[in-house]
Image (tube, rainbow, N blue to C red):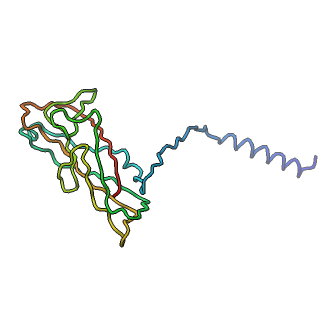
Amino acid sequence: MNTAVKAAVAAALVMGVSSFANAAGSNTGTVTFTGTIEDSPCSIVVGDEHQTVNLGHIGTGSLMGGKESSKVDFHIGLENCAFTTEKEASTVFSAIGNESSANPGSVALMRIGGGEMAGSSIVIGNHLGSAIKLGDAYSENLTMNGSVAAEKQTLNFKAWVKGDSAATTIDTGEFSSTVNFTISYL
């Protein structure tokens, strides 16, 4: 073999060996794509369809006698809206199995591990802090762009814990309560 061919073969071998010598391990995984296509003029902003609202650490003394905790803001963003004549969004919150037994229309505080906590409940309100009972429709004007509603909308709400006015004790501990919402366009 001539020296040029030998040099080329040697270089190819060195490059091949060095590339294997530097190769690191590999990782594998999967990606699952999920979603829902709904008959609606809007899409809910990703992340707003499943939210967690932290109501904080609340002392029983701040709830006794029907008092309320601080109100915490939350919102539902809508995007890519294709409105024609709609001018309002109507939101209904429901809590199947999580409605307060002492305060119908409010959300029960469900103890981590199970069971309803007695003495207080969660209230959902509009952006001004007026209570919205579970199952009742709350209508809000859409942001307009001329005579047509804008492509992006934000529905603003508040939530807080309210003590039962007749309660002599309030259960303590961690809670996690879930509500569903349905938005209709009028």
Between residue 142 and residue 31, name the one nearer to us: 142
Compared across the picture, whether 111 is left or right of 147 comes to left
Q: Please say if 156 is above or below 181.
A: below
Residue 167 placement (x, y as % from top left): 8, 33
Q: 68 or 92, which lies in front?
A: 92
Residue 113 position within the rendered picture, expressed as x and y whole percent measured from the top left: 28, 26
Residue visible at 30% across and 51% down?
91
Q: Which residue corresponds to the image point at 25% horizontal and 52% vertical from the top-left?
A: 138
Is residue 185 positioned above or below 115 on the image?
below
Give the x, y percent position of residue 104. 18, 37
Residue 14, located in which quarter of the rendered image?
top right
Task: Kindly give the residue lying farthest to the bottom in the view shown.
Answer: 146
**Residue furthest right in the image:** 1
Picture coordinates of residue 176 (x, y %)? 27, 35
Residue drawn at 21 percent across, 29 percent down = 116
Would you say 45 lies left or right of 23 here?
left
Up-down: is 137 above or below 65? below
